Amino acid sequence: MEEKEFDKNLKKIITSQERKLQKKYLRSIEASLINTNNSKKFNWLIAASIGLFIGLGSYLFLFNNSLSNEEIYNTHFSPYANVVEPIVRDKVNLSKKAEAFSLYERGEYKKAIKSFNLLSDKDSINTATLNFYKANTYIKLNEFEKAKNLFHKVIESNSKEWKQESMWYLALIAIKLNNIDTAKTHLQNLQKQNKQAFKTEEIKTILSNLK
């Protein structure tokens, strides 16, 4: 377990430092070339530098692309933050909606889904928002089919809220379940309609790493 966590952390470090290392290496090579007068030594240094740089680039490329689909999912998934019902700590008499979101925030997902299932429009929450958070809760409970059905309902609803976010989570579920063609379709569709730069860099990264 510790070795797996170490490998995961190492990959993140190498990914974040890759460009800095390459730029630093190029600068050092440039400085060496400037200070080199002997033509044979100059040519040898060029050849060695090119070979080393290609080798370094290949290594980093392979290392960065060695993430499994499970690791991609774990890296990018987190349940959507509660932006609907601000929770007042130590408040005794919570509304049904506040109680549901309080349980959600605390990670008590089995209790949260029961509370969410008791809510309706009468509790000052629209159907799309309720379905979106219920779907997030079902993901945490590993009930992916229920989550997928709710995300699809959000996308197909008349509400303008949560559509891109739902497509994002459908892609992550597909990755989790190794349905890679489906994941790519969701991500590519999200790219096409993504006018507000929603998860732009994450989408590019995932598409380049999916196997």
Image: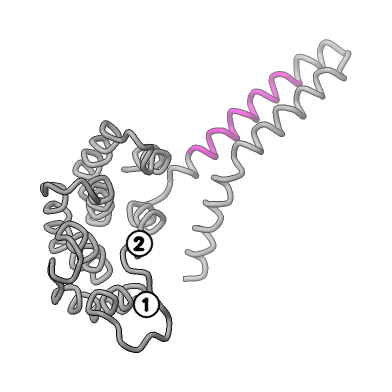
- Disc 2 marks a residue whose amino acid type is Val
Q: Residues within 10 Å of mark 1 (few under 14, many from 20)?
A: few
Quarter of image, res 47: top right
Q: Position of residue 26 (x, y in %)?
A: 70, 27
Q: What residue is at 25 percent from the left and 40 percent from the top?
A: 184
Judged left or right of residue 159, residue 32 is: right
Q: Residues within 10 Å of mark 2 (few under 14, many from 20)?
A: few
- SS for dot 1: loop
**In the image, farthest residue toward the top:** 39
Q: Magenta span: helix, strand or loop, mainly?
A: helix
Q: Is residue 194 above or below residue 16?
A: above
- Disc 1 marks a residue whose amino acid type is Arg
| Colouring used for the render | one colour
Q: Is residue 43 magenta?
A: no
State which region is magenta.
Answer: 45-61
Q: Position of residue 109 (x, y in %)?
A: 27, 76
Q: Is residue 92 above or below residue 124?
A: below
Which residue carries the number 1 mark? Answer: 106
Mark closer to the chain start, 2 or 1 = 2
Q: Is residue 50 magenta?
A: yes
Q: What residue is at 17 percent from the left and 60 percent from the top?
A: 126
Which sits in the foreground, 204 or 57?
204
Which sits in the foreground, 125 or 198?
125
Which residue carries the number 2 mark? Answer: 83
